[in-house]
Image (tube, rainbow, N blue to C red):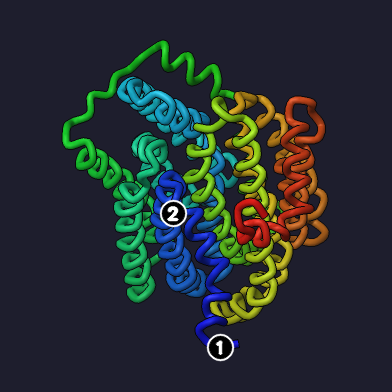
Amino acid sequence: MPLNAATRAVSAPARKLFNKVRQRQGILESLSNIGWLGSDRIIRMFGAVLIGTLVARYLGPDQFGLLNYGLAIYGLLNIISNLGLDSLVVRDIALDSTREPSILGTAFVLKALASVVTSIAAIVAARILDPHERVLIIIVALISFASISQALDVVDFFFQAHTRSRYTVVPRTAAFAAASLARLAAVLLHAGLLMFAWIAALEILFAELGLLVSYLRYRRVIPRWTWSGKEARALMAESWPLLISGVMSMVYLRTDQILLGKLSSMSTVGNYSAAIRFSEIWYAIPVIVTTSVMPRILKTRDADPQRYYARLQTFYETMILVSVGVTIGTLILGPTMVRLLYGARYTSAASILSVHIWTGIFVSVGCVGSQQYVHERITTSSLSRTAIGAVANVVLNLLWIPRWGGMGSAMATLVAQSLASYFADGFSTRTRHIFKMKTRAFFHFWLLPVSLLRAPGE
């Protein structure tokens, strides 16, 4: 075959796919949004690899484990301050932008009040768990009080609703870059453990202030957010299952490190934390994609339900396909990366990673499912599924950590995530249609590339 003809033959499927995408402005906007969020994640990924591993090697498994133990306590309590509002605020602004001032103002006040309460609770929890570990209490206090500024996350919700995430990426990436340089300087200057806690706290604070600046520049006027008791009651009436669901999700994402710290050693926490950093880099990608795509899919639900479910089915299959690819790649490259980056003191991190990375597949499915619950107004189902996952994770960690240490905790997380994100949907008639969609996606995801390249009418 002549070279030009061969080139045309190879590029024809790509041209078909490009033409389909180009004809849909909404898809292009979503892809642009994914691009901005993806670039932020790539920068953070390389920062975590280059700076995060340098910090881990410098601190060693014991101090690195103590730092992550404190972060886990903070994270477990901090999720409550979100109040389950994020998806609801994004949905309501996307559907009715005229309510923006009252929605954002009300959500901001609710989150600010909740953040103060959870910050105090996190410090009390650290003191109860380890009353003699003064450094741990200071770490939790620094990061918790800085997190009060995360009430400004309502600005992020606003930009998500309008698929304009570039306005949130810039300030957050700038704060992350500055914090990474500060961490590098702390290592070079042989700083103590508390300096890394200060850096983490300041990164949160400056990122949130940057969000506010972006919003002011975008709106070009000082926002007139208003408190509305009616909005507050409506939001909280629908958000409480999402709030409890979020807490339960954090239980099976962070309780493993807390239980490892109590049932094993800080060195084990350090090895485990080093391993799951590779998994958690991937965890952010499904959130980014879902945030960008689901508001567009939502707009078709009332007008064309058949199209809504067809697009949602394709979305499930896409997320699984990408997740499987990432998992296989990590299984191949992960052990070498862990050995080269973390060194000989983190000997068990590679085996932990080989189990933990499989949770990413169920995290991807769960991200899409969580948004579907919100869109179809069945948020109580989100509560029940995450409760199942949280209980399973705690019980299995208690059983398996004494026997297998970090590996047992990784296995417990995998089982709990699969229960919460997939199997639990089959237990209720309200979510059985979602379970069927996910099951179909697990069986058909490998056919997705063929269907995307197929010409219309074929």
- Residue 147 falls left or right of residue 167: right
Find disc 1 in the rendering and name its residue. 2
Q: Residue at x 27, y 24 (%)?
A: 225
> Which is nearer the N-term, disc 1 or disc 2?
1
The answer to whether one can see residue 199 in this image is yes
Find disc 2 in the rendering and name its residue. 22
Farthest residue in the top direction?
230
Pick the front one: 225 or 76: 225
Element under disc 1: loop
Q: Is residue 282 above or below residue 434?
A: below
Q: Is residue 245 above or below residue 59?
A: above
Q: Position of residue 156 (x, y in %)?
A: 38, 40
**Image quadrant where residue 110 sits:** top left
Q: Nearer the viewer, mark 1 or mark 2?
A: 1
The answer to whether one can see residue 257 in this image is no
**Image quadrant where residue 369 sits:** top right
Q: Quadrant of the C terminus?
A: bottom right
Q: Mark 1 to mark 2: distance in Å?
A: 29 Å
Amino acid tagged 1 = Pro
